[in-house]
Image (tube, rainbow, N blue to C red):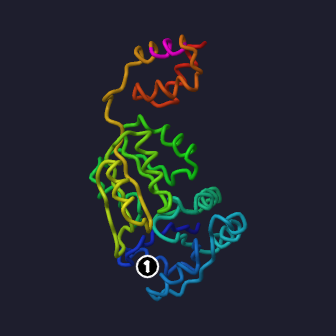
Amino acid sequence: MTTLYLVATPIGNLEDISARALRVLREVPLIAAEDTRHSGKLLAHFGIPTKMTSYHDHNKGLKLEPILEALQKHDVALISDAGTPTINDPGYELVNAALAAGHTVSPIPGPSAPIAALTVSGLPTDAFLYLGYLPRKQGERRAYVEQVASLPYTLIFLETPHRLLNALSDLQKILGDRNIAVARELTKLFEEIYRGPLSAAHAHFSAQPQRGELTLVVAGAPPNVGRWTEDRVCAEIQARFANGESPSQLSKEAAKDAGWGKKEVYSLVMEMRK
């Protein structure tokens, strides 16, 4: 059975591509690329004449079957615009479909912005949670962060330049003034890695225009520092119930004081009401 190769490509510096990746891209009869124009420049730089077909979020429904048909005849390589395919890039559906059809799926590892940023962040790397792009809308963004506020793992997010300041503000509001590393333009000419508290990061990036790809690496919650016991939270819930607060408002305010996640407190509220 043929193989679908997931080939990691540079996130900036072309020297980061591996010898194995170059060999596979030369040997396969077909490359499925997120943007054939963008990838065409990469292939031209290395003198690789392999045929390409586009495969991206807007056409994956149409292209899935033709690529699977190609896999019936020969190996295919999947590449994204930069970094490792399927990590915030198209490919998940294709991988599952290829596996279901009995094909081999093989990684050709290499650059990945989230991992690169984590390794240089100065924050713990033994346990981390990659969460992709933060939601665009403030309410959704804050709710998204609240879900992981109490977790001890280092948190990794992607963000766009025009939303960076709002994201930093919301992260500080929900998580407190934790340490963060903001990695910008990794491996490129104007690479910058800012490390410090969230408040200082906001001040730093407020003083200059934001450009380039951004990865945010945020410290996890300290183990039980300032976190109330469940008995104390239950007592607070009862007191707030007595004051006539709604479950939603109660959960929000109590979570902030107790160092718990809003959803954790809300679940406890619902249990106590039963």
**Segment tinted magenta in the rendering:** 236-241
Q: Is residue 245 magenta?
A: no
The residue depicted at 37 percent of the width and 48 percent of the height is: 218
Amino acid at circle 1: Leu
Decide: is 51 above or below 243.
below
In the rendering, at what x and y percent does residue 154 appear?
Answer: 36, 45
The C terminus: image quadrant: top right
Q: Residues within 10 Å of mark 1 (few under 14, many from 20)?
A: some
Question: In the image as oriented, which residue stretches furthest toward the front?
Answer: 207
64 vs 90, left or right, is right
Disc 1 secondary structure class: helix
Decide: is 113 above or below 124.
below
State the residue position of label 1. 22
In the rendering, at what x and y percent does residue 174 appear?
Answer: 44, 39
- Asked whether 39 or 145 is in front, the reply is 145
- Asked whether 218 or 92 is in front, the reply is 218
Q: Main secondary structure of the magenta part?
A: helix
The residue depicted at 65 percent of the width and 73 percent of the height is: 70
The residue depicted at 62 percent of the width and 58 percent of the height is: 93
Question: In the image as oriented, which residue stretches furthest toward the left?
Answer: 122
Figure quadrant of residue 110: bottom left
In the rendering, at what x and y percent does residue 151 appear?
Answer: 40, 36
Figure quadrant of residue 186: bottom left
Q: Is residue 238 magenta?
A: yes
The N terminus: image quadrant: bottom right
Figure quadrant of residue 216: bottom left
In the rendering, at what x and y percent does residue 241 appear?
Answer: 54, 14
- Asked whether 132 or 126 is in front, the reply is 132
